[in-house]
């Protein structure tokens, strides 16, 4: 655990000297802020007067999931790919550290930075709670942020695996983006072209966005938590295997 925590702190500090991290932070906060202001303004001027319901936490959680889908590859593309490009991977592999500790430490550093960004967005539910009477549903808000955290854990783990495969940051970025789009959008396509129940059930189970939407309802199911955790473990396992293969090359 000491090795993992040391690597995680190193990666976390590195994000604060990286321009890409600041760009990602700006994109996340600015995008959520714009969606928040637009929805609140619309509800205040037109929506409520026509009998529409007041805005809820979905105006924050929905855009936040999309933004992390698009920005997570930028947070993970350099984790292991940059070490290979700069030739420092060999130094890490000769250090007294296990392969899985290297992978988990890198992933944890990215996760801690992402959790910092998620914590910043809590300002929007706090403001919304003051604007809406009698306030937003706290249970739904907690379920929504739990869904975001599980989602980000999964995105970063899959991104770490792709970063371990490539030695080029841009290849790692686009490889991760394509993989995330598959799990978020494309994996459900077979359900539209077949009516075979076993196939439909299989791809529905693998649909990450469907799991995310289930959590947003506030009815947290065990499988909806276990699936992203399983994908996270799978991503970290693949990354560890790739790093071990490089050790013996």
Image (cartoon, rainbow, N blue to C red):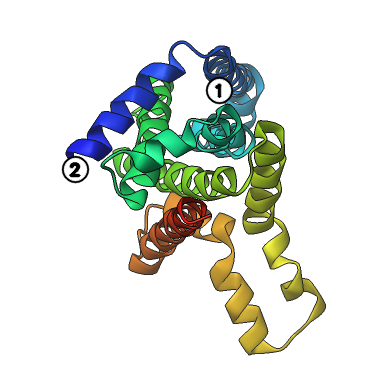
Mark 2 or mark 1: name the one nearer the start of the chain.
Answer: 2
Quarter of the picture holding the N terminus? top left
Residue 9 screen position, x and y as percent: 29, 25
Q: Are marks 2 and 1 in contact (CB under 8 Å)?
A: no
Any part of residue 186 in sight: yes
**Residue at disc 1, secondary structure:** helix
In the displayed structure image, the side of residue 238 where residue 229 appears, left or right: left
Q: Quadrant of residue 108?
A: top left
Q: Residues within 10 Å of mark 2 (few under 14, many from 20)?
A: few
Q: Quadrant of residue 193?
A: bottom right
- Residue 1's tag is 2
Along the line of sight, the residue nearer the viewer: 204 or 233:
233
Distance between the alpha carbons at the discs numbered 2 and 1 = 31 Å
Query: Given this view, does label 2 or label 1 mark the residue nearer the observer?
Result: 2
Any part of residue 129 in sight: no
Along the line of sight, the residue nearer the viewer: 51 or 149:
149
Q: Is residue 242 above or below residue 45?
A: below
**Residue at disc 2, secondary structure:** loop
In the displayed structure image, the side of residue 72 where residue 133 appears, left or right: left
Along the line of sight, the residue nearer the viewer: 83 or 106:
83
| Mark 1 lies on residue | 28
Residue 168 screen position, x and y as percent: 67, 35
Residue 65 screen position, x and y as percent: 55, 39
- Farthest residue, direction right: 193
Q: Quadrant of residue 73?
A: top right
């Amino acid at each position: 655990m000491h090795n993992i925590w040391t690597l995680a702190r190193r990666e976390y500090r590195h994000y604060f000297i990286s321009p890409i991290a600041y760009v990602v932070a700006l994109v996340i906060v600015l995008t959520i802020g714009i969606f928040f202001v637009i929805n609140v303004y619309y509800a205040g001027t037109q929506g409520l007067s026509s009998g529409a319901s007041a805005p809820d936490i979905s105006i924050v959680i929905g855009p936040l999931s999309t933004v992390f889908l698009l920005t997570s590859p930028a947070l993970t593309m350099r984790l292991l790919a940059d070490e290979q490009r700069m030739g420092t991977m060999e130094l890490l592999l000769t250090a007294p550290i296990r392969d899985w500790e290297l992978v988990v430490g890198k992933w944890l550093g990215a996760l801690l930075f992402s959790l910092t960004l998620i914590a910043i967005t809590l300002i929007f539910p706090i403001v919304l709670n003051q604007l809406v009477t009698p306030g937003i549903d706290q249970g739904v808000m907690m379920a929504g942020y739990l869904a975001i955290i599980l989602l980000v854990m999964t995105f970063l783990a899959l991104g770490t695996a792709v970063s371990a495969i490539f030695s080029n940051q841009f290849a790692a970025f686009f490889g991760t983006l394509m993989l995330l789009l598959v799990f978020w959008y494309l994996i459900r396509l077979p359900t539209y072209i077949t009516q075979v129940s076993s196939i439909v059930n299989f791809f529905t189970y693998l649909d990450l966005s469907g799991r995310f939407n289930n959590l947003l309802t506030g009815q947290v199911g065990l499988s909806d938590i276990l699936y992203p955790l399983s994908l996270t473990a799978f991503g970290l396992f693949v990354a560890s295997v790739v790093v071990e293969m490089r050790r013996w090359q």
